[in-house]
Amino acid sequence: MGGVDATDACCACGGGIATDAPLAQPTDCSDSTSWYHDVPENDCAWVQRMPATRCQEPNQDNIPAVEECLAACDNCPVEPPTTFQFPETGVMVYKGGDPEDCHCEQNPEASNVVPVCCREDSSCFRQPCLAGRTKDGTFVSLGWAEAARRCAEHGASLCFEPPPATQSPETSPNCEAAGCGYDREFVWTNVTCPKKDDFQFPMNGVVVYRGGDPSDRKCETDPKAKDRAFACCDGKNKCFRRLGGNNEGCLAGHGDSFASPTWAEAAAACRDAGAALCVEPPTAPYKKRRGPNCDGAGCGKYDKLYLWTNIECEESILPEAPKFPDEGVLVYKGSDPNDFKCVKDKNKAGIAPVCCFGNNACFRKFEGGECMADMALGAGMSWADTVAACRAEGATLCSKPPTSTDKRQGPNCAGAGCSGGGAYGWTNIPCPAA
């Protein structure tokens, strides 16, 4: 199927060698009973005692031992297999000059893919050049099965291990800088694409980002959490949410067809699209169609949802929990950003919980829509409990004064429900010195 370049989250993975694609098998072989070097006592048994130096010794006809003492010199011929079964899940193909540029190829007759072969010790070779571009620019390609057969003829196989963590051109399936002009092409391998169940959810959970706001993030520890969309990324953090030019191609569905995919389903869908779940966080200044939230890439509903990534949660995702300032904190009236006062008792009753993200966007409800505290009942919440509730939602107490009168912005958080308009809300803004 070809596709978009993938990140190394994809390129370093694979299901291993395709069990139905046989390697070349040794044929029966034996040592010559007539070959000897100089004297009859220096026969193949003599060679076997020191093969490293004696396999090159000739007989009276100048034939080296390696050609006659086949077992002694570990030079048994191999019988190439005659049939090769393309893996059901497809195989990984890697750019010859960049092992981090890869995708899952599911078409065994894909054009513009060339063969690279690996020996039993995982060392690779491209020559003799079996495919590629001719001097007149014509591209000569080989299908996967034919590439596998050609490697077998040379006593090798298509490479069946993903690139090592520490890049080694001599043992990597792309076989970088090994000639034939293949650095510009994708190369066939025998590394099977991972199945959906092969994707392992990180032990600490993953960071999810709000589609319309890259500063709105939290840690998701449930790989089957509901109402999650996703975007896929390539190796340069370029992202996409859909295949094709309209929302009919949205990866997680759209409108009534929204599928609420699990993390593994999202990872598999990106794999099938020739990419991977995003592995790099957004970087400022934020750009559209960049990074895991993938703002501006269509599928408008996704702007309101959190999107799956493959970025493992770390303790540093949120700053250290704050301590209540000795001088107290300011609390703001929900209906009026200019109405605030100082509270020095962190357990004062009747103060509403309010949480903020880094861009000062605020909320009063848990993600599922339940109020942290329904102020119509006068319940309120302590300052410490508000800190804990905000952190559980991937946010913090508001630490910036109001900067606008927009709804759901700043510590007063107007229009955020839970009858908060008539109550004061907690912040982490210290009271000014008297």
Image (cartoon, helix red, strand yellow):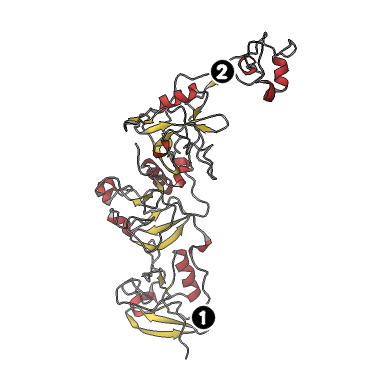
Q: Kindly identify the amino acid type of the residue bearing the numbered disc 2.
A: Pro
Q: Is residue 198 left or right of residue 418?
A: right
Please tell me which residue is depicted at 50% across the width and 35% down the height of the picture.
Answer: 16
Q: Residues within 10 Å of mark 1 (few under 14, many from 20)?
A: few
Q: Position of residue 30 (x, y in %)?
A: 63, 13
Q: Is residue 56 above or below residue 183?
A: above
- Circles 1 and 2: CB atoms closer than 8 Å: no
232, 341: nearer the viewer: 232
Q: Is residue 230 left or right of residue 39?
A: left
Q: Earlier in the sequence, mark 1 or mark 2?
A: 2
Please tell me which residue is depicted at 69% across the width and 15% down the height of the picture.
Answer: 44
Q: Kindly identify the amino acid type of the residue bearing the numbered disc 1.
A: Pro
372, 304: nearer the viewer: 304
Screen quadrant of the N terminus:
top left
Say how many tags the image has.
2
Q: Residue 196, located in which quarter of the rendered image?
A: top left
Q: Position of residue 31 (x, y in %)?
A: 65, 13
Q: Residue 414, located in which quarter of the rendered image?
A: bottom left
Q: Nearer the viewer, mark 1 or mark 2?
A: 2
Q: Position of residue 12 (x, y in %)?
A: 49, 43
15, 91: nearer the viewer: 91
Q: Secondary structure at mark 1?
A: loop
Q: Secondary structure at mark 2?
A: loop
Q: Position of residue 301 (x, y in %)?
A: 29, 56
Instruction: Single out the residue that lies furthest toward the left.
Output: 246
Query: What is the CA distance from the residue labelled 1 to the residue labelled 2?
Result: 80 Å
Q: Can you tell which mark lies on residue 325? A: 1
Please tell me which residue is depicted at 72% across the width and 12% down the height of the picture.
Answer: 38
Q: Is residue 194 above or below residue 76?
A: below
Give the residue pinned by disc 2: 77
